[in-house]
Image (spheres, grey):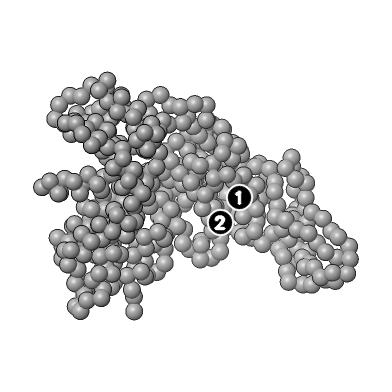
Amino acid sequence: MLTPNDVFTPGKLPIRPTNVYAARGEAETQFRKALQRGMIPVVYGEYGVGKTSMARFVLRDADEAGRLVNVESVADKSLDEVFSRCLEKLGYAVTTKRVEGAVAARTHEQSGQAEANSGWLKAIVASKRSQTVSTTQQVEEQFVVTSPTDSKLIELCEAAGVVLLLDELHRATTDFASDLSKFLKSYGNASCSKFKVVLLGTSSDASRLVSSDPGIDRLLQEVHLKAMTSSEAEFVVVKGMGDLAIKIEPSTVDRLVRTCVGSPSILQYLALETAEAAFSRDPRVVQAPDVEGALQAFVETKEARLNKSYVAAIESVGELRYRKQILRAMAECEDEYVTMEMIRTRVSEYLGKDIPSTALSGPLRDLKDERFGTVLSDVERPDGSGRLANYTTFKDPALKAFIRLQILRESEGAA
């Protein structure tokens, strides 16, 4: 018998057969097309919008076949570590030193060897490991480390049909981004048909890679994954509750859809909390207080950290409360990086009168100050040479959807 945890998956990827997953419309279509055409999709969108879930769901066949190399985060990693992960998946190793002696050691099938001679390491790429035991020598092994333009790794990955998924590309070091650009250039020149590369990050990552090597621009396909549509969110709720034999009224479905503010992670949490409350009843029927209880638990327990940041940052007094209006404008912009003009336009709409930029510049600076929790920050240039003038982003990207949720709660409370 299915339980709510089998269906709704906050904090986990909805890629198991019992999990409920909603197709992501045009973005998912573009993602699949890019892979079919041999291009490199660069998926970007706000935090918690479901980039990893979409990619892993589309790539689930490669995962089940053992061909997916998923690097969850490239933060503080070098490209040779990524190469190592690829070869580890394929079962290849590098012999770097042999120690003679009467000790047990594994040997290798002699199906072939390949010379890897680069500036990083000179070594022999051994063939796939076997379980044969020898008592004549000890072999110390490490996985291959090669140059970012080395064609041998690409040949091995092409032969095995590897899918390389690099997540959190925005956290990559400058050296990693530079080496990755070189590697992608070699990858493009190899005209691979089975080896696929997928990148997940932010809207500036494609520019960052192209700035290192303009020649790879033709290989990249940017895919903007936006917030969930109402129909996508409704599918998750209706399908999930139906799988659990839980009855839920259309008005309650609508309440969950509106409350999740387009965030799959928020929706999964609220749906799970609601389903657990109804699951223990006989008959299994969702009641209105179940949703309110789920929402309260989310704000006060699951995301208490974000709630504290938001409360500390907004104006507590004053008629116009500019800091709060700025945060709302930032949260409701689809763009990840927001200009002063975009903020000014939205704040003017909220307040019903024209607000000059000069009135907002001080409160905007405050939100980048430690006194108010450093909620916002300037945007760094893709090449790391400084900041982009007139662009602002959230310091903690998880705040974007959370603030939309809080604004919704306040508006409905007032109503």
Residue 30 drawn at (x, y percent): 39, 48
Taking depth in this image into account, of 27 and 3 the one nearest to the observer is: 3
Contact? badges 2 and 1 (CB < 8 Å): yes
Which numbered circle lies on residue 82? 1
Give the secondary structure at mark 2.
strand
Whether residue 239 can be seen here: no
Which residue is depicted at the point 56% across and 64% down? Answer: 66
Measured as percent of width and height from the top left, residue 171 is found at 51, 42
Q: Residue at x 86, y 65 (%)?
A: 137
Q: CA distance from mark 2 to mark 1?
A: 9 Å
Give the image quarter of residue 95.
bottom right
Q: Is residue 282 visible?
A: yes
Tell me which label, 2 or 1, sits earlier in the chain: 2
Image quarter in which the N terminus is found: bottom left
Q: Position of residue 124 (x, y in %)?
A: 77, 53
Estimate how packed mark 2 is, as few (under 14), some (14 to 19) or many (20 or more) residues with alpha carbons within 10 Å.
many
- The residue type indicated by label 1 comes to Val
Q: Is residue 129 above or below residue 53?
A: below
* Rendered residue at 36%/60% (across/down): 10
Mark 2, residue position? 69
Residue at the spot 17% in from the left edge and 67% down from the top edge: 287
The one nearer the camera, 175 or 321, is 321
Q: Mark 1 falls on what kind of element? A: helix
Inspect the image, locate mark 2, and give the three-letter code of the amino acid beneath it. Answer: Val
